[in-house]
Amino acid sequence: MTDSAELLSLLVVVEFVVMAAVVALLVPLDAALPFLPLAFVFLVVLYLYWT
């Protein structure tokens, strides 16, 4: 079972990825561009965590 710090970190990463995806869909791409590299890194981290 995961400890509370790991679960909280996982929830923060998931929230950031979801919010970055929403921002990328709602605002122009030039405004959302700074969020996308970090969202991609977090997405890779989530994939590696769940596999």
Image (tube, grey):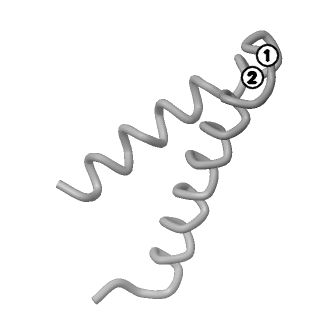
Residue found at the very far top of the displayed protein: 30
- Frontmost residue, 32 versus 40: 32
Q: CA distance from mark 2 to mark 1?
A: 7 Å
User: Quarter holding the N terminus?
Assistant: bottom left
- Provide the residue designation for mark 2: 32
- Residue at 43 percent of width and 41 percent of height: 43
In what element is the residue under mark 1?
loop
Measuring 75% from the left and 23% from the top, which residue is drawn there? Answer: 32
Query: Which residue ends up furthest to the front in the rendered image?
Result: 26
Q: Residue at x 48, y 30 (%)?
A: 40
Q: Left or right of 40: which side holds 33?
A: right
Whole-percent x, y for residue 18 in the image? 58, 49
Residue type at mark 2?
Answer: Ala
Q: How many marks?
A: 2
Task: Identify the mark at residue 12; answer none if there is no mark.
Answer: none
Which x, y percent locates residue 8?
56, 75
| Residue 49 percent across, percent down from the top left | 29, 56
Amino acid type, mark 1: Pro
The residue that disc 1 covers is 28
Q: Are the residues flagged by discs 2 and 1 in contact, CB closer than 8 Å?
A: yes
- Above or below, 7 against 32 in this view is below
* Residue at position x 82%, y 18% in the image: 31
Q: Nearer the viewer, residue 6 or 16?
A: 16
Quarter of the figure with residue 45: top left
Q: Quadrant of the C terminus?
A: bottom left
- Classify mark 2: residues with Cα within 10 Å, few (<14), some (14-19) or many (20+): some
Relative to 36, say whether 3 is above or below: below
Residue 11 falls left or right of residue 33: left
